[in-house]
Amino acid sequence: KPSLTNPYPPYAPQRLPFIGHILHLLRPIAAQELFRRWSLLVGPVFTIQLGAKHWVILNSAQSVQDLIVERGTVYSSRNLPDALVYDLMDGPSKGGGFAFYEYGPAWRSLRRIAHSGLVKKKINEYQPIFDERRNTLLINLWQARAQYQVKDGGLSLTHFIEHYTMTSILAIVFGNMCNFEPGDTRLHQAFALTERAASIFGPTEQLAEFFPVLKMILPSRKEENLDIRNKMVDFYGGLLTEFRRNLEQDTDGNLVDECFMKDVMVGGELTDLQMMNFITVFVGAGSETTASTLEWLVALMANEPDIQDKVYQEIQDKVGPNQLPGAEDESSLTYLQCVIHETLRLRPPAPLSVPHATSDNNIYNGWLVPKNTTVILNLHAIHKDPARYPDPDKFNPDRHMEYVLRQNQRFSQTVDDRPHLAFSTGRRVCVGIHLAERSIFMAASALLACFRFQRISDDLIDIHNPRDIRAPTFAPSPYKVNLIPRHDGVESLF
Ligand code: HEM
């Protein structure tokens, strides 16, 4: 009998009530929510069999702590489709797509290089890039607001925010060379490529992985994958060539900014192919996730005007009306920090993380988890656990205040020391966490200092239906808001 109290019920196949099956079949439901509901019936850790494959789904913070953190040497590998690892990322021995590579020396040495370029100290050095990108975001919004807001009944922020997150990452990688205007076709092509690459996680490719026999029947995606790869080589390879040329001509050190690629090229550890795949991974992993967090945040603020006003008041009290908040103001803007944590808790952009895999056989609570088993971290379920977050569906920033005051964003390895697990945990924890947090803080603090985000009707913005229920990134459905300047001097701030 399913138990909701015993965290580890006996391992036995459990059946959903027949009517439950029918309802699930009729109504599309995101996988993370489906897994969460199953976990309430059968317990926080369960296995599902998908054709030839077994997946173990972890739905509790305790199981993530037990396996992903404490048994990290076994539970930190990957077992992703060959299409991703080899067709797109050229495999661990040649390529640089370490996010998708199995746990081992190749992943470790590439991860070390990524880590050294993205530690907090480096992010502080890149601060002028964030200041400049944040101002560009505000200028673009200000102009669009005047042009479209009245005519179109509100403004969709999607393209502006995507432009901000993607150009911030590109500027950190390549420095001042990457000055793309919004609407630049090259930039949109790069966005489109990332989306096409993400479709490898999509149903057809996954079906063929689960039922290998289908690989003989279904049309091969190889040509499509090679086309994506060639276009990535064109775009990122072109930037790399331009960067190298600039670096060679930079005899007095004024032409090329301090940036990730400069360190990597001077370090001389990576081949061109590895460097290119590195950038692809940074942009792929970092731009959509950060953008969707900002889009959720604006939607939540428009739905919760009192909370929005409280953040604005905090900015006025701590920073004042005559300047925009800077990185140095982050520690004093504690309520805004809570709002950002709560947004990431309620709407984690990667709700099922990136699938892990075991690199050895392992026994957990008497169950054998064989080598190469895919292990899914259901961050969505953990974030909705009422024992950790009372009234979990409520947007309640105050629940993080104690953490913010105590630690002020010092992350450690145990799951209980974190306000949420949106960046995952353990050895594979998001390597871009400091970049993402700074980027979110800079944009959110500036947007909320300048504008009141107002809904275009009395109806709340829909925060329940994602843009694409099958996509690995959880982004809100398209919405529009009005941007009301907070005071007469707003334009002079940027
Ligand atoms: C709000 C923004 C972001 C969120 C919520 C997020 C979340 C995540 C999550 C859940 C994972 C999977 C960890 C695991 O396997 O357990 C991950 C991995 C990763 N993230 Fe992020 N991420 C964000 C932004 C970024 C940025 C800005 C970058 C870099 C520029 C980045 C680079 C990576 C990389 C390279 C990995 C793979 C790490 C590995 O396999 O060793 N992410 N991220």
Image (cartoon, rainbow, N blue to C red):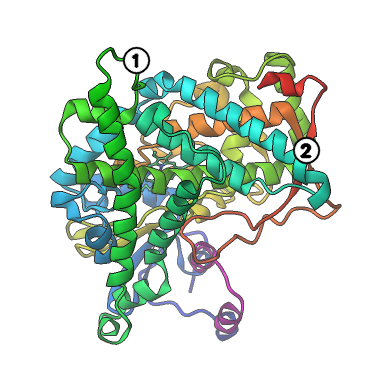
Q: Is residue 430 in the magenta section?
A: no
Front residue of 93 and 248: 248
Question: Which residue in the protein does label 2 denote?
Answer: 146
Question: Which residue in the protein does label 1 denote?
Answer: 254
Q: Position of residue 154 (x, y in %)?
A: 78, 48
Residue that appears at 46% across and 69% down: 42
Front residue of 428 and 99: 99
Ligand 1 rendered quadrant: top left
Q: Which residues are magenta?
A: 21-38
Q: Which residue type does callout 2 highlight? A: Ala
Front residue of 102 and 471: 471
The quadrant holding residue 223 is bottom left
Q: Position of residue 21 (x, y in %)?
A: 54, 82
Query: Is 339 placed above or below 52 here?
Result: above
Q: Position of residue 357 (x, y in %)?
A: 27, 58
Q: Secondary structure at mark 2?
A: helix
Q: Position of residue 444 (x, y in %)?
A: 62, 32
Query: Is 172 placed above or below 427 here?
Result: above
Query: Is 489 placed above or below 401 here?
Result: above
Label disc, if present, on residue 115 of the rendered structure: none
Q: Which residue type does callout 1 highlight? A: Asn
Tell me which numbered mark, 2 or 1, is placed earlier along the sequence. 2
Front residue of 59 and 323: 323
Q: Secondary structure at mark 1?
A: loop
Residue that appears at 68% across and 37% down: 141
Report, in whole angstroms, how far the alpha carbon at label 2 lies from the one at label 1: 37 Å
Residue that appears at 83% across and 45% down: 150
Secondary structure predominantly adopted by residues drawn in magenta: helix
Q: How many marks?
A: 2
The quadrant holding residue 219 is bottom left
Q: Residues within 10 Å of mark 1 (few under 14, many from 20)?
A: few
